[in-house]
Image (cartoon, rainbow, N blue to C red):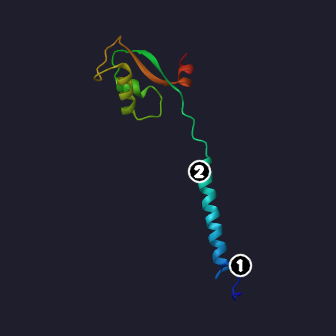
Amino acid sequence: MQTARGDYGHIRVKNPVRALVSLLVLTFALLVVAKALLVTPPRIAEVVYQPIVVQDGDSLWRLAERTGLAQDTRTLVYQIMKYNGLIDSTIHPGQVIYVPVTVSGLASAN
């Protein structure tokens, strides 16, 4: 039996325009999701720790700011303390502290 608007086997389409628009919207949504999944994640820079001799007036905060890494300074201070086995943020001139730098930052420092 055929309806006035069309009969496509066992699927009855009352409004072919609405069905076409829905199909196009669904296709677009799937393409957006597929593109998001296929985007290459940003490359994470390799970080190494470089020894720094503490100078008069230095602080962990200042050393962390000088790393040039795109991280919150508080996080960098914590990482420096953890890596160096410090229980607080006290440092002294002449003390050797290891600070994180990117491999490219290490190459430019030499």
**Above or below, 12 relative to 21:** below
Q: Position of residue 87 (x, y in %)?
A: 28, 22
106 over 17 or under it: above or below? above
Identify the residue shown where x is 44% and y is 25%.
66
Q: Nearer the viewer, mark 1 or mark 2?
A: 1
> Which quadrant of the structure image shows residue 28?
bottom right
Instruction: Give the image location of residue 29, x and y in percent.
Output: 60, 61
Quadrant containing the C terminus in the rendered view? top right
Please report contact status of discs 1 and 2: CB closer than 8 Å, yes or no.
no
From the top left corner, tell me how far across and down residue 51 is, in percent: 44, 15
Q: Which residue is mark 1?
A: 8
Q: Residues within 10 Å of mark 1 (few under 14, many from 20)?
A: few
- Mark 1 lies on a secondary structure that is strand
Instruction: Look at the numbered disc 2 and give the secondary structure of its residue.
Output: helix
Quadrant where the image shows the N terminus: bottom right
Q: On the rendered structure, is 63 left or right of 28?
A: left
Sequence order check, earlier mark of 1 and 2: 1
Q: Which residue is mark 2?
A: 36
Residue located 61% across and 59% down the image: 30
Say which of 106 and 20 sits in front.
20
Q: Quadrant of residue 43?
A: top right
